[in-house]
Every structure is written in structure tokens, then in C-alpha cells.
Amino acid sequence: MWWFKARRVHTVVAASLAAVAALALIFQDGTVRLPSLTVASGTVVLALFIPIPLVAGLMTSLESRLPGPEATGTRHVQAMDAALVIAAVALTTLLCIGLGAALGSSSSYTVGRNSMFLTGLMLCARPLMGRPAVMMPVAWLITTVLCGFRPGNDPRPWTIVPEPPLAPHAAVGALLTFLIGIAVQLHTSSRTLK
């Protein structure tokens, strides 16, 4: 119970999931024109940005540690943290698939995959950067918007997040990044995280 309260699952993670649901309802298949270095006028689906509250909430939750009890305790805190991340991303995926089906929004289907990918990026950077690793997904999205599209608004394969829902390379890339991030989470000592 102390882990649940220390990680603020009932407040921070729950609020993050609620924010994702609200943004998915509001944005649906909406688009916005953003500056791009590679195409004349880049039109970006707003759903690309929906995972950011989840990633920020997970980082806040993972960083709200009790260093003393966690270092000396017998519970496997890292496994519990990994389970929290997996559950939050799985719930986000199911929620957005349901919303996509109910609203007829094809962009909502990609939110789960993108949440998986961006959370994996954050987890991979966390041992090196600590709290600032929350900016890795934001940096990825900015890079994607600025130079991730070819003429005709066709996303480059490395971008992952703007790819259509059934793009196999995007699904594989997101899953691999997430699994590597979970492995890093499980094998990084909480004492080395600053």
C-alpha cells in the first residue's frame, strides 16, 4: 500500500489517463498546420500529442520515490514500477481503441502504439538523464514535425508516431522500444536514478 501511495497512482496516473481520454475525445481526427523543414506546409494529426500527459504522469509517478525504504526493503519495487507502466500503457491502448471504434476516429487507434513508443523512449533515457528524460518524447515529436515528412505529407519510416494504424514497422518499432525501456526499468538500480 505504501508503494501505491508513494507512486501517487490514484492521483497522478489516474489524472494522466483521464487527460488522455479527454484529449482523444476532443482531438479525434483533427489536424493542425505546423512549420516543417522538409515540406512546404506540414499538416499534423493532433492525436500525435495525446500520449504526452501519460508519459509525464508516469515519469512523475516513477520519480516520487522513498529512497530509504526502497533501498532497504524486500519488495521488488522495480518490478512493481514496471507493472505500473505496462498497466498504464495497456489501459491507454484499450481506452483509445474503444474510443476509436465508438467515434469512428482512425487517429485514436494509433494513440496506444504511440504511447508505447514514447514511454519506451522515456524509460530508455531515464537512467542517463533522470527527470529530464521526460523531454525525450517531446523532442521526438518536435523532430518528427520539423523533418519527419516527405512531400505529400508522407511520414518517413523512422518517425513511427505519424504512421497509419496498420503500419507493421511502426508497431514493431513501438513494441521493441517499449520492451527495451521496460528491461532498462527492471535492470537499473533505483539508487542510480537521480
Image: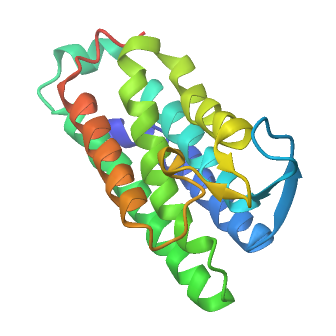
Q: Residue at x 43, y 65 (%)?
A: 91
In this picture, residue 183 sits left or right of residue 11 = left
Quadrant in the picture for residue 72: top left
- Residue 50 in percent (x, y) is at 66, 55
- Residue 77 in percent (x, y) is at 23, 32
Q: Residue at x 55, y 68 (%)?
A: 164
* Quadrant assignment for the N terminus: top left
Q: Is residue 34 above or below residue 2?
A: below
Q: Residue at x 11, y 26 (%)?
A: 74
Seen from this angle, which residue lies furthest left? Answer: 74
Seen from this angle, which residue lies furthest front? Answer: 151
Q: Is residue 118 above or below residue 131?
A: below
In this picture, residue 45 sits left or right of residue 61 = right
Residue 6 appears anywhere in the view: no
Q: Is residue 75 above or below residue 22?
A: above
In this picture, residue 103 sits left or right of residue 94 = right
Seen from the viewer's position, the closer of residues 44 and 194 is 44
Quadrant in the picture for residue 75: top left
Seen from the viewer's position, the closer of residues 79 and 98 is 98
- Residue 10 in percent (x, y) is at 51, 51
Residue 177 appears anywhere in the view: yes
Q: Is residue 134 above or below residue 104?
A: above
Q: Residue at x 64, y 43 (%)?
A: 148
Seen from the viewer's position, the closer of residues 19 and 68 is 19
- Residue 194 in percent (x, y) is at 43, 9
In this picture, residue 45 sits left or right of residue 31 = left
Q: How is the image coloured?
A: rainbow
